[in-house]
Image (cartoon, rainbow, N blue to C red):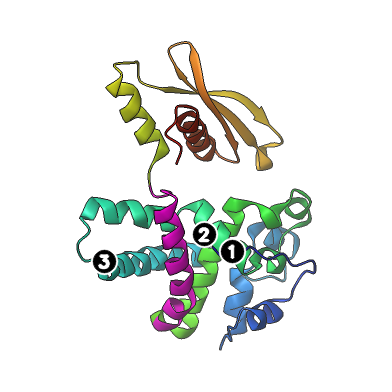
Amino acid sequence: MTKTKTYKEDELPEKFAQRIGLKFNDPMLLCRALTHRSFLNEHPDAIEDNERLEFLGDAILDFIVGAWLYNELPEMPEGELTKYRAALVHTEQLAEFAKQIGLGQALRLGKGELQAGGKTKPALLCDAFEALIGALYLDQGIDAVQNFILPMISESFEDIVSNHKGEDPKSRLQEIIQAENLPIPQYVVVNELGPDHSKIYEIEVMVGDKTLGKGSGSSKQSATKKAAQDALTKLGYGL
């Protein structure tokens, strides 16, 4: 897997595009893709945030990843294809793509979001990456998006397969527990840390009165997944 690079300086949109090898015919599309709504709230001169582009980019990524999997894996059944597509367009995976290209340093954020560490938040990076894909599609079409994203998809797919990242730890844990005729695992939020805009959830997975695993994350879904993974590891079924 390509190592995530870090960039110490904030970047202007055009410098960011130049560094990652993209040239936009309409620079305003790129600027919009990198503009979080918190920036718009503090800068009345800014025209639009990236949420509409995020919506478009999400749909385009689903299509490109689905088509790539369909062509690359002609013998794979629909259920497996769906599993791997979900893994490749998951929030944490798209945030990883964003980190690989140093997208966070080019994000335009409001002061509050900036102080809260917005440039490194997985959910925010994921949204901005989707917006970048949407902007690139509008600017240059589907071929340009494929040329940009497919090398990342191909490399990440190899990592997902070799490290079993496409498997849902929550479902796998439930199958193992039920095979032992034990109660269905329950996920309990044991703590919530931080302000509302930057919460960290701590979750434990329990079977009966026994805690099998623990996890924390910026969303309940992420923390639940980590708790299930922790339980699987402790039971000797680590992913």
Q: 171 or 115: nearer the eye?
A: 171
Q: Nearer the viewer, mark 3 or mark 2?
A: 3
Farthest residue toward the front?
Answer: 236
Kindly state the secondary structure of the residue where label 2 is placed. Answer: helix
Image location (x, y in percent) of residue 126 = 55, 58
- In contact (CB < 8 Å): disc 1 and disc 3: no
Task: Measure the C-alpha gap from mark 1 to mark 2.
Answer: 6 Å
Kindly state the secondary structure of the residue where label 1 is placed. Answer: helix
- Residue at figure coordinates x 40%, y 83% from the top left: 143
**Dot 1 surroundings within 10 Å: few (below 14), some, or many (20 or more)?**
many
Type of the residue with mark 3:
Tyr
Residue 1 picture quarter: bottom right
Image location (x, y in percent) of residue 47 = 64, 71
Residue 70: numbered disc: 3
- In contact (CB < 8 Å): disc 1 and disc 2: yes
Residue 98: numbered disc: 1
Q: Nearer the viewer, mark 1 or mark 3?
A: 3
Magenta segment, prevailing SS (helix, strand or loop): helix
Farthest residue toward the top?
Answer: 209
* Residue 66 falls left or right of residue 96: left
Type of the residue with mark 2:
Leu
Residue for badge 2: 94
Give the residues drawn in magenta, as a range: 143-166
Q: 139 or 85: nearer the eye?
A: 85
Image location (x, y in percent) of residue 133 = 49, 71
**Dot 3 surroundings within 10 Å: few (below 14), some, or many (20 or more)?**
some
Type of the residue with mark 1:
Ala
